Each structure stands twice: as structure tokens, then as C-alpha cells.
Image (cartoon, helix red, strand yellow):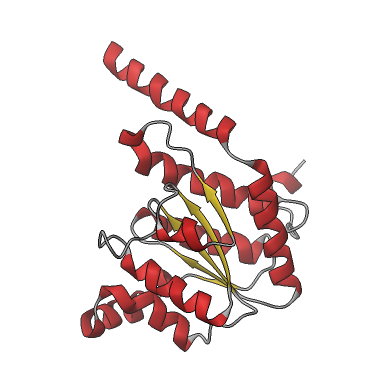
Amino acid sequence: MNPASVSYSRQHLEEAARILAALDPEQCEAAVAKLAALRERGGRLFVLGVGGSAANASHAVNDFRKIAGMEAYAPTDNVSELTARTNDDGWNSVFREWLCVSRLNGNDGVLVLSVGGGSVEKNISANLVHALELAREVGALILGIVGREDGYTARVADVAIVIPAVNPERLTPHCEAFQAIVWHLFVSHPLLARSVTKWESVR
């Protein structure tokens, strides 16, 4: 066995343990309370992400719908519309225009899963920024699970869970992995969980 490989595995897992210990449970509780209130008022949750976070968004939508009984959607699940809008109008406007057609309003919420949270100045995930600008215009709830405090999402969110950057060289893999830990915390929280998942019901 390669000692260098073992050393890397140990380091990666030790970093994950440090992140877990540094996550803010009060921020998680605040986000859960906002989500519970959103469901109570009949609002919809739109989960936005690009790249690996888009895959996470799809998984999260499944969990919010099936486990928490919330109406939830991810624009990236509709590949035809996403690519048509990108082809005709450009990538930066795709989420905003999708939310416009979905009639995003003040009863609804937007959950951003992103490493950086978007930056127009740096031309990174500007589509998230434009979507959140719309969310602010209509008074929708904004939540984020992100890896940077200086990104647009963290700056404008009602609640942002910032994944601690214990190693800046591995910001992306840790952030995308911990997005799943945090949203699973949300949907399994007693304030949100409505359905028992299959294996927990098997004795």
C-alpha cells in the first residue's frame, strides 16, 4: 500500500472532521425554522446549483419532497429548457428567467447550493446572482449552503450555512460533500421530517 495515498486519505478525513466540528448548529436551526414556516404558508422551494451542486440540487429536491413533504423544484432537472435558454439568451440569465416563468413570489424560497455563492465581478456563477436579485425583488426567502463568506449568496441570504474552509486547496470537494450533510440535517429534522425513510422503518 502506498504510504502517500494513506496519508492523503487520513488528511482528507481529518479535514472533514474539523469542518463537521466547526459547523454552526444555530444557523442550521435558523434555516430549518425558515423552511418550516415556508411549508406552513404553502410556499415552494427552488434549489439552485451548477456543476456538482446541480446534482446535489436534484437529490435535495427529492428529499425535500419525499421526506419533508415540501413542494420543491430544481431548474437544472429540466435539461431541455435549460439548454434552450442558454442557447438563445446566454447562461447568466437561465435561472432568473426560469424563476420568472415559475412566478417566484414572496411566499416562496430559494436555496442555493454553491461553492462560492456567485460573483458578477469575478464572472463566476453569475446566474445565481441574477436569480437572487429576482428573489430579493419579490421578497422570497433566500437560503444558502456555500463555501465562501464573500460570495453573493452569503451576503444576501436570510440564512447562509458557510462550510468552513479548513483547507483552501480542497474547498470544492469539501463544500459539495457537506452540502449533502446539511440538507440531510434539514429534511431529517423533527420540525421538517414527515416520512420515515425506508431502512429506518425496517426492523
Left or right: where does residue 29 sit relative to residue 136?
right
Quadrant of the image occupied by residue 121: bottom left
Left or right: where does residue 26 sit relative to residue 105?
right
Percent position (x, y) of residue 92? 29, 73
Q: Residue furthest left?
A: 87
Residue in view at x 39 percent, y 68 percent = 129
Q: Which of these two is toward me, 73 or 131? A: 131
Residue in view at x 46 percent, y 88 percent = 101
Q: Which of these two is toward me, 131 or 80? A: 131
Total numbered labels:
0
Percent position (x, y) of residue 118? 36, 60
Residue 198 seen in render: no
Percent position (x, y) of residue 172? 36, 44
Q: In the image, is residue 16 above or below residue 124?
A: above
Q: Which of these two is toward me, 44 or 93? A: 93
Q: Which of these two is toward me, 104 or 181? A: 104
Question: Quick one: quadrant of the C terminus?
Answer: top right
Residue in view at x 67 percent, y 59 percent = 67
Left or right: where does residue 39 sit relative to residue 96?
right
Left or right: where does residue 134 sit relative to residue 120?
right
Residue 18 seen in render: yes
Residue in view at x 58 percent, y 78 percent = 139
Percent position (x, y) of residue 160? 55, 54
Question: Quick one: quadrant of the N terminus?
Answer: top left
